[in-house]
Amino acid sequence: MPQQEATLENLTTTVNELKELSLHIVEHMATKEDLSALRAETKEDLQREIGSLRTELKTEIFELRTDMENNFSQVKTEMRLGFEDVKAEFEQVHKEIEILDKRTLEDTNALAKDVLQLKTQLSGA
């Protein structure tokens, strides 16, 4: 019988330990209200975080847009100045071509006169 008493005592101890464990679990177990509160808190935290991220994104987008507009404005100004330089060079080249055309015409006329004089001299000689 001592063995039965030991087994019964072990069984009682095990049942008591299980009872204590169950009580501990029940005491610390989350209730529906706890879960609802946690869900609501998590939702609020996520909404705040999303709002914060949206604000940061809007700020970043605004800064990028401003930088792009400034850079585009600078490029546009540089291009305008570059085109003005090219235009001035074309105008200078055009003037030089006009001078060359005038000189070529004058030289051609002078040469034609010289050829006529030589022809006249050769036919009269």
Image: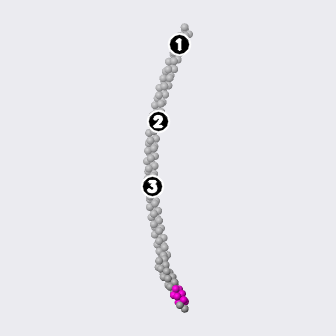
Query: SS at mark 3?
Result: helix
Q: Assess whether mark 2 and mark 1 are in contact (beta carbons under 8 angstroms).
A: no
SS for dot 1: helix
Query: Looking at the image, is mark 3 or mark 2 earlier in the sequence?
Result: 3
Q: Is 26 located above or below residue 100 in the figure?
A: below
Query: x, y percentage for residue 36?
Result: 48, 73
Circle 3 residue: 60
Query: Residue 87 at what x, y percent from top left?
Result: 46, 35
Q: Position of residue 114 (x, y in %)?
A: 51, 15
Identity, as a three-letter code, of the amino acid under mark 3: Glu
Name the residue tied to disc 2.
Answer: 86
Is residue 8 at least partly visible in the picture?
A: no
For the residues labelled 1 and 2, the Cα–Cα distance comes to: 47 Å
Residue at (47%, 71%) from the top-left corner?
38
Q: Secondary structure at mark 2?
A: helix
Question: How far, Cα to Cα, is label 3 from label 2?
Answer: 38 Å
Q: Nearer the viewer, residue 6 or 55?
A: 6
* Magenta segment boundaries in residue numbering: 3-11
Callout 2 environment at 10 Å: few (<14), some (14 to 19), or many (20+)? few
Q: Is residue 112 visible?
A: yes
Q: How is the image coloured?
A: one colour
Q: Whole-percent x and y of residue 2?
A: 53, 90
The residue wearing badge 1 is: 118
Specify whether residue 4 is painted magenta: yes
| Residue at image location 45% in from the left, 36% down from the top | 85
Q: Is residue 101 above or below residue 3?
A: above
Q: Amino acid at mark 1?
A: Leu
